[in-house]
Amino acid sequence: MHEVTATDIETYRRQGVVVIRQVLDADLLTQIGEGIDDNMASPSSWSNDYTVEGAGGRFFDDYVNWERIEQFKDAATTGALPHIAGALMGTHRPRFFHEHVLVKEPGTVTPTPWHHDDPYYGVDGMDNVSLWVPLDDVPEHVALRCVAGSHRLGRRFIPNRFIDDSPYVDAAAGFERFPSVDELESLGDIVSCTASPGDVVAFHFRTLHSAPGTEHHRSRRRVASFRYVGDDVRWTTRPWKTSPPFEPNGLKDGDVLDEQRFPLIAL
């Protein structure tokens, strides 16, 4: 199997996104696939269906089920994924933040709109990574798209709702309204992350990204994203309900995420 190289790490830190080819074995992919099946058969109260009414296909998502779905727990806390996360963040002690399942059935019109994940989360810090793990081939016309270098722009945007692309709030200190698509696409080169099972698309919480629907795609597009934080990440309060909607449970702004919901993994 491919290992994370110095080139992968440099690309990740410079671009905010890197595709690491054939780094996961078939057993791990089978395990994650079983977890997705279990998740879709028994979704949590935080699950969503973003399918446009009257349109074909289905866009399902759910997250933070690793404590009840053993396949996700094992994948997130042992083996290849935490090692990849640690290498990209430059830490021997990555902390697991949460997993996120995203499934688009064939013929799904609904795209994933342009956004960056950071404002949705109740954490701050630059040591972080999402490991986007596809279980199906992801060719160009359904691939994740990222704005290279956007994690280093120093700009943060008010999150929009996926269901209708409306902003969470009209204004917030330190955050801008989301730019138009034309402006957004002028911020950097667009990297199209074609991928196959066994690949990992790693991207930063502040990297701007989107994905098309599968209206003209004949296969499912199943993805599980495993998210990790590193040494400088701290709990923070946002001026909106976060996603996932984690409660503080005693955590205060500036605290390390030192509790069982966010397990520390010693590599």
Image (spheres, rainbow, N blue to C red):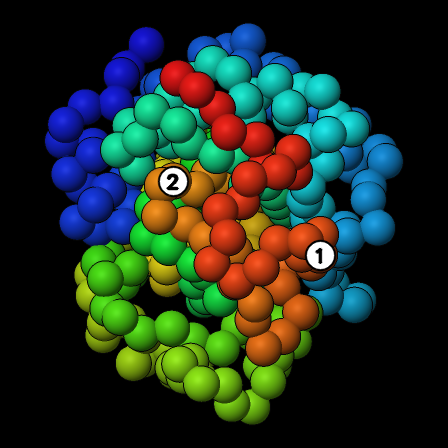
Dot 2 crowding, Cα within 10 Å, few <14, some 14–19, many 20+: many
Q: Position of residue 212 (x, y in %)?
A: 49, 57
Q: Is residue 88 visible?
A: no
Q: Position of residue 180 (x, y in %)?
A: 39, 83
Quadrant where the C terminus sits is top left
As drawn, 155 above or below 9: below
Label 1 secondary element: loop
Residue shown at 49% from the left, 66% from the top: 119
Q: Position of residue 156 (x, y in %)?
A: 38, 73
Indicate the amino acid at tag 2. Answer: Gly
Dot 1 crowding, Cα within 10 Å, few <14, some 14–19, many 20+: few
Label 2 secondary element: loop
Indicate the amino acid at tag 1. Answer: Glu
Q: Is residue 232 left or right of residue 76?
A: left
- Residue behind mark 2: 230
Q: In which image quadrant can residue 257 be found?
A: top right
Relative depth, front residue between 36 and 104: 36
Mark 1–mark 2 Cα distance, whole angstroms, equals 20 Å
Residue shown at 62% from the left, 38% from the top: 259
As drawn, 177 above or below 225: below
Q: Mark number for residue 247?
A: 1
Q: In which image quadrant can residue 50 be found?
A: bottom right
Relative depth, front residue between 140 and 245: 245
Q: In which image quadrant can residue 148 be found?
A: bottom left
